[in-house]
Image (cartoon, rainbow, N blue to C red):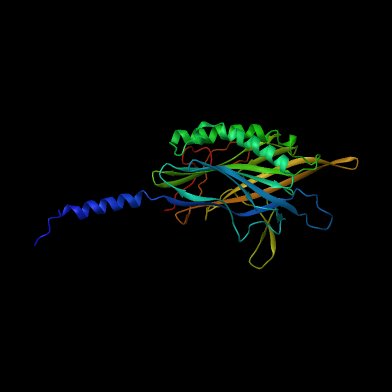
Amino acid sequence: MRSLVPRALPVFVALLLGAAAQAAPTPVKVEIPIVRPIQTYTLGQEGGQAEDEIYLLASGVANGQEFNKRIPEQGTVKAAPKTPPFEGKPATVWEGNLNDGEFAYVTVVLMQGSGKDEAKLKEFQGKLDAAAKGVAERSKKTLTTAESDKLIEETLKAQQGVVAKVKDTFSREKNTDHFGGLFNLIVWNNGGKITKRLDPVGLTFGEHYGVDAKIYTKLKYTRANVLEKDKAGGWNEVQFPPVDEDKPEVVRVKMLENEFVKQGDQSIKKTTDYLVEVRVTAGGKVLEWEVGDKQPGPGTLTTTGSTRSSQIGAKHPK
């Protein structure tokens, strides 16, 4: 007996299965594989290497749900030029699945200090959260290109207003923890293609030029003063770009503060300088970063973005 099932049915089923496969969510992970202390916040003793305690505060929204995370969950991580945190054991900032149109928007703050002053941390995080949650697009589960641009621009502007007054909460004179820097990262499933963009908070105190007091988080070349161990185990001072040309798998965020510290009758300049590397994988593949041609500030570089070429974005793996 011949089957009465139409011959077109197997093709129809195959099309349905293909559509289901295309609609499958993409697993995404945001990591910090290393934090490089270039100059520590702790005042070094003569003849010894200064060492900081650091921790990261990660917060944001993903799949329409707010999240907060502290790295490490308890305590701090030791940090010095020759002992960079998370080397060989990347810190996961956010991990999850994104369906078409869904996004994760993550804010990362680097802090130096013991992390024990919960009241001040709660006050600072509360101000940042209020600034970020004031942007309407944050509450959406999915985004259009125009909405992603608005989320990025308005959040950054609101955060800059908070960070510009960070010394009211954290300062050396008040013997508190120290604000190291802040950046935002959006990861977005745009039509099945995962794109990303990173926006540092920028210059929030002082002037771009000169060596006077200033605070910034930027994407720019370091000086040739970052210690890196070579294959023979020796240490060399090298210069790092925001993105490597040959293997652009991480973007490097530079966080610096120049301040003047009183020592006896004198006031000496103290620089705190850190370099944070960020890596994003999607579907098990590392997304590459691509350098753009616009400069938002002196010596500051950018990469080509998925929604706007003046900031940070991603190049999808070939």
Residue 234 pos. (x, y %): 69, 65
Q: Is residue 260 above or below residue 72?
A: above
Tell me if I can see residue 108 in this picture. yes
Residue farthest toward the left in the current orientation of the protein: 1
Give the mark count: 0
> Which image quadrant: the N terminus?
bottom left
The furthest residue to the front: 1
Q: Nearer the viewer, residue 246 or 318?
A: 318
Residue drawn where x is 12% and y is 59% of the image = 3
The percent coordinates of residue 121 (x first, y second) are 70, 41
In percent of the image, x 34 and y 52: which residue is there? 21
Q: Nearer the viewer, residue 60 or 273?
A: 60
Which residue does the image show at 61% across and 37% down from the upper left? 129
Where residue 269 sits, quadrant-wise, is top right
- From the viewer's perspective, is residue 154 above or below residue 192? above
Q: Position of residue 264 (x, y in %)?
A: 90, 43
In this rendering, position of residue 300 left or right of residue 4: right
Q: Residue at x 78, y 44 (%)?
A: 270
Looking at the image, residue 290 sits to the left or right of residue 59; the answer is: left
- Residue 297 visible to the viewer: no
Height in image: 225 above or below 153? below
**Can you give x and y, in whole percent of width and height, for residue 130 in the image?**
61, 33
Residue at the extreme right:
265
